[in-house]
Amino acid sequence: NMKGIDPLSLDIFSNKGILALYRVKRQNMERLSFACGGALVNYVEDMDASMLVYAVKVSKVMLGEDEITFAEECRIPKARRAGDYHLS
């Protein structure tokens, strides 16, 4: 969601082991979704288990002034580098 996720929803997702990203450019969300085999969801009512993806490690790294999110070892990789993908 580009406008943000309320704190209660973030807490619920976190307690279930689900990472929810917010304030991410749509193009970058599409890249991550494609790379890991998931789907973009704007409303919880529209979500089902088939839209979720699994990554062994997700991390944010500062490279200069850019913050980059890495998703590594995705269960259903579609990226060029064997399941590792990053957002710039």
Image (cartoon, rainbow, N blue to C red):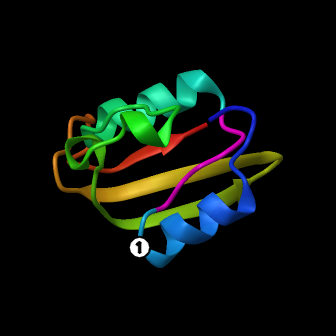
Observer-nearest of 78 and 40:
40
Observer-nearest of 85 and 37:
37
Quarter of the image with the N terminus is top right
Quarter of the image with the C terminus is top right
Amino acid at the residue labelled 1: Lys
x, y percent for residue 72: 35, 59
Identity of the residue furthest to the top in this view: 27
Crowding around mark 1 (Cα neighbors within 10 Å: few <14, some 14 to 19, many 20+) is few
The quarter of the picture where residue 37 lies is: top left
Which residue is at a point 54% across and 54% down the rendered structure image? Answer: 20
| Residue 21 part of the magenta-drawn span | yes
Up the image or down, 44 lies above or below 16; here it is: above
x, y percent for residue 81: 26, 43
The quarter of the picture where residue 2 lies is: top right
Which residue is at a point 49% across and 77% down the rendered structure image? Answer: 15
12 lies left or right of 74 = right
- Residue that mark 1 sits on: 16
Identity of the residue furthest to the left in this view: 76
Which SS class for mark 1? loop
Residue range in magenta is 19-24
x, y percent for residue 6: 72, 53
| Residue 12 part of the magenta-drawn span | no
